[in-house]
């Protein structure tokens, strides 16, 4: 299954089914009446200090105390400046107790990332592939890092910068005053050309598949069911 031109080129020697990404497939299935919030920042949480993948691969994890102190301080900065709340798109593997402990009574929602992205003002992201949701709905994106993340993984900054350059979006270290000044007056508008290219390269490479679910595409390819 190839979602986007990049993967199609990489695997051109294989039997390819041109499709769209799982994130876009979720868009086709979602009932948007479930979420009615408007005008907020949406943070895509990655469960940084206790993600099971990090534990499985024996990676060092962040110290939650400085990490969440930094993060909540930044959220407060945004909320005061723009008069909008920060809402948390919860990570599916994190427990409810984690959000109650670390996010200062901010609202959090499980399994609603796509719907929440559709209605938000802008997204706040580290390096999750769920950035596809921001691209699908053409939302301004601010890519974040802080000193604790850099301490644990020196190359994390470069990884996140790759995402920000691909979309032409803001990238800031939330622990640096000079970086905060970059978004003090205005949230950077989206670069439509870069969003369009990201969409073609990683989300959808065939317009004729745009309204067809992955299950339908598979049936058409192998079972000749239309």
Image: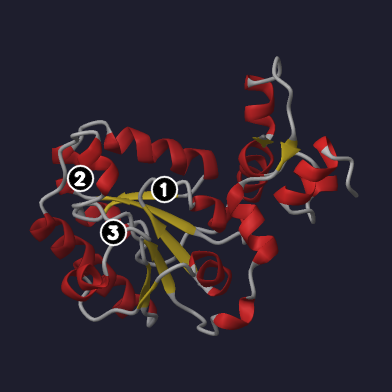
Residue furthest to the top: 13
Q: Position of residue 133 (x, y in %)?
A: 55, 57
Label 2 environment density (alpha carbons within 10 Å; few <14, some 14–19, many ≥20): many
Real-space CA distance between mark 3 and mark 1, rounded to the nearest whole angstrom: 21 Å
Question: In terms of depth relative to the viewer, which is nearer, 2 or 107?
Answer: 2
Q: Are marks 2 and 1 in contact (CB under 8 Å)?
A: no
Instruction: Give me the disc on residue 180.
Output: 3
Residue furthest to the front: 223
Please tell me which of labels 3 and 2 falls first in the chain: 2
Please tell me which of labels 2 and 1 falls first in the chain: 1
Label 1 environment density (alpha carbons within 10 Å; few <14, some 14–19, many ≥20): few
Q: What residue is disc 2 on?
A: 149
Real-space CA distance between mark 3 and mark 2, rounded to the nearest whole angstrom: 17 Å
Q: Is residue 9 left or right of residue 78?
A: right
Quadrant showing the N terminus? top right
Q: Position of residue 121 (x, y in %)?
A: 50, 71
Q: State the residue at coordinates (20%, 52%).
A: 50
Q: State the residue at coordinates (51%, 71%).
A: 116
Q: What residue is disc 1 on?
A: 128
Please tell me which of labels 3 and 1 falls first in the chain: 1
């Amino acid at each position: 299954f190839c979602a986007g031109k990049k993967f199609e080129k990489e695997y051109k020697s294989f039997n390819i089914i041109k499709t769209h990404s799982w994130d876009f497939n979720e868009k086709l299935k979602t009932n948007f009446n479930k979420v009615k919030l408007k005008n907020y920042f949406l943070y895509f949480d990655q469960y940084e200090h206790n993600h099971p993948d990090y534990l499985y691969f024996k990676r060092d994890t962040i110290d939650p105390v400085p990490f969440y102190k930094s993060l909540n301080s930044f959220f407060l900065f945004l909320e005061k400046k723009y008069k909008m709340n920060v809402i948390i798109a919860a990570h599916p593997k994190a427990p409810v107790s984690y959000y109650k402990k670390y996010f200062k009574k901010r609202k959090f929602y499980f399994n609603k990332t796509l719907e929440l992205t559709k209605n938000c003002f802008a997204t706040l992201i580290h390096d999750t592939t769920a950035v596809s949701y921001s691209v699908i709905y053409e939302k301004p994106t601010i890519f974040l890092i802080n000193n604790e993340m850099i301490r644990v993984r020196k190359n994390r900054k470069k990884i996140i910068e790759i995402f920000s350059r691909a979309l032409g979006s803001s990238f800031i270290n939330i622990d640096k005053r000079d970086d905060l000044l970059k978004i003090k007056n205005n949230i950077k508008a989206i670069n439509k050309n870069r969003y369009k290219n990201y969409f073609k390269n990683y989300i959808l490479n065939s317009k004729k598949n745009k309204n067809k679910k992955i299950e339908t595409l598979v049936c058409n390819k192998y079972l000749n069911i239309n």
